[in-house]
Amino acid sequence: MLTKLRRYLFVSWLVFIIATLAACGGSDNAPKIKTIKNLTLFVHGFDKDGYKASGTFGDKHPDEALEKFQALGQNYPSSKDKVVINITQATTYYGDTPPDYYSEQDKQDLKEVTAQWDGGIPRYAMIVEKYAKHLMIQEKVERINIVSGSMGSLVTRWMIEKDVEGLASHKKIAKWYSLEGVITGNYAADRKQYIEKIYGGSALDSIDITHMTSDWIEENFQNPVSNATSPYYKNILLGQQASTDDGLGHGALTKLLFLNGQFSANDGTQRVKDCRFDDVLPEAQFHDQAPTFTLIHKDHLSLKDHKGAWANVMIFLNAKKRVKVTLADAKVEDIKEDYPWYSTNDRAEIVFASKVYSPKLEDLWGIKEAIAENTRSGATLTVHHYNENGDEKELNQFILDQFVAADETKLNIDFKVEEIDYAAKYGVYERINHHYDLIDETQVSVPLENGTYPFKGDNWSFNLKVVVINYP
């Protein structure tokens, strides 16, 4: 009888201890699991008929690209001490009907800004900001991320720099990631004949086109508009991604650029140089760093179908491990330059193309596409001049600058080294009937640890510099 009583008392005591620990969240030594809501709002781009659209603006709005992005968010792994719930939503700034949550003051605010600016970017920015505040109240979160595409990036820039609704000054925007963004302007918008040819004459009546011109942007943003100078950026992590396939519309934008003697890498709609800030002043830098920057070889419309591009966004919104990879230098054993008798050139024009792949993303989501591409056909490469076989040059060429998953330990990089004989995009005109010579194709795996790593191909050897920055 005594033994049974002791057993009963022991079991009762054990149950009490377990219940107490559960109520208190475990012992002091046990890890405490924290649940974090990661709220992200997607801001869409230009629609040629959007300015005259009917329907409700500033409310939940379906988006085809966003649905693919949401699927990645549901499967993003949480860390050992926290569970991250990714909440993504899209809205539209086009329409003529305010949403139900608008107060009379909200309606009056929008009426006034529309009258002042004739609608357009300032109106859209206010609509997006009010919806962002509405979402934060709904989801009970303190901060929000913005992902913007095309003209949506100009809307977002206005939101931040003009501190619409006070979100920027009150540090309510945590991160901003821009996809093919109209950040510093749109070359095509300055040329009405191009807009009419591509979108039709009705597009010329859109206030959106006027607000994307360099004149309007230079008049209404702090100069130089290519720089980020606002101190509000100091509290926002910035990421920028651009596309380089210019085949959209049979290369119409490239033809226009050549016609004006101003060729620049583009995605058929937007120049790469207009999709990023040239410089971010110290007072605007988040953690003393410039924005991340990624190139993908897709055109302006097909980027939405590139899984690697969307994975980059999801990693950016969740990860804290930033990686910079630079092609520090390269020695070329065979420069493949055979000068024709009529040539006055005595050097080889060599480009080093690269594609970066993530083993972690392939394991996590089955993504085999490159997460960063700097291709010869994209016309973003620097031409390096080599005089003879065996020349070695310091290059410091950009390969990668973006976030990766916390447990990503290496990246795979495919290099393609070519000597150019004829390419209008690079300003090389040596041989009309012969465009390129392949020097080497090399695949390497680079560890994600600070350092400089040597590699060797068949016809070249090179060093890759890796810098890893861990954010708090």
Image (spheres, rainbow, N blue to C red):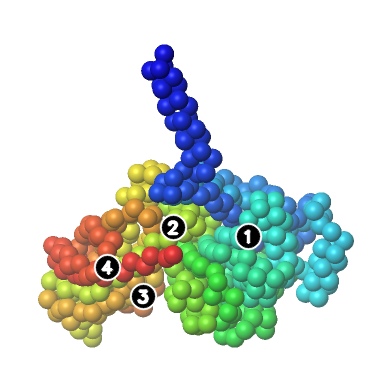
Q: CA distance from mark 4 to mark 1?
A: 34 Å
Mark 1 vs mark 3, CA separation in Å: 48 Å
Nearer mark to the viewer, of 3 and 2: 2
The crowding category of the residue bearing disc 1, from other C-alpha atoms within 10 Å (few below 14, some 14 to 19, many at least 20), is some
In terms of secondary structure, where does tag 3 sit? helix
The percent position of residue 213, horizontal first and vertical second, equals 64, 76
Q: Nearer the viewer, mark 4 or mark 3?
A: 4
- Of the residues tagged 4 and 1, which is closer to the observer? 1
Of residue 79 and residue 33, the one placed in the foreground of this image is 33
**What residue sits 64% from the left and 81% below the top?**
221
Q: Which residue is mark 3?
A: 426
Task: Name the side, left or right, on which 406 lies relative to 205.
Answer: left
Residue that label 2 marks:
319
CA gap, disc 4 and disc 3: 33 Å
Q: Which quarter of the rendering shows the C terminus?
A: bottom left
Name the residue carrying label 4. Answer: 450
C-alpha gap between disc 4 and disc 2? 18 Å
Helix, strand or loop at label 1? It is loop
Q: Nearer the viewer, residue 268 or 365?
A: 365
Mark 3 and mark 4 in contact (Cβ < 8 Å)? no
**x and y, in percent, of residue 15 in the image:** 47, 30
Q: Position of residue 57 (x, y in %)?
A: 75, 55
Q: Is residue 101 left or right of residue 438?
A: right
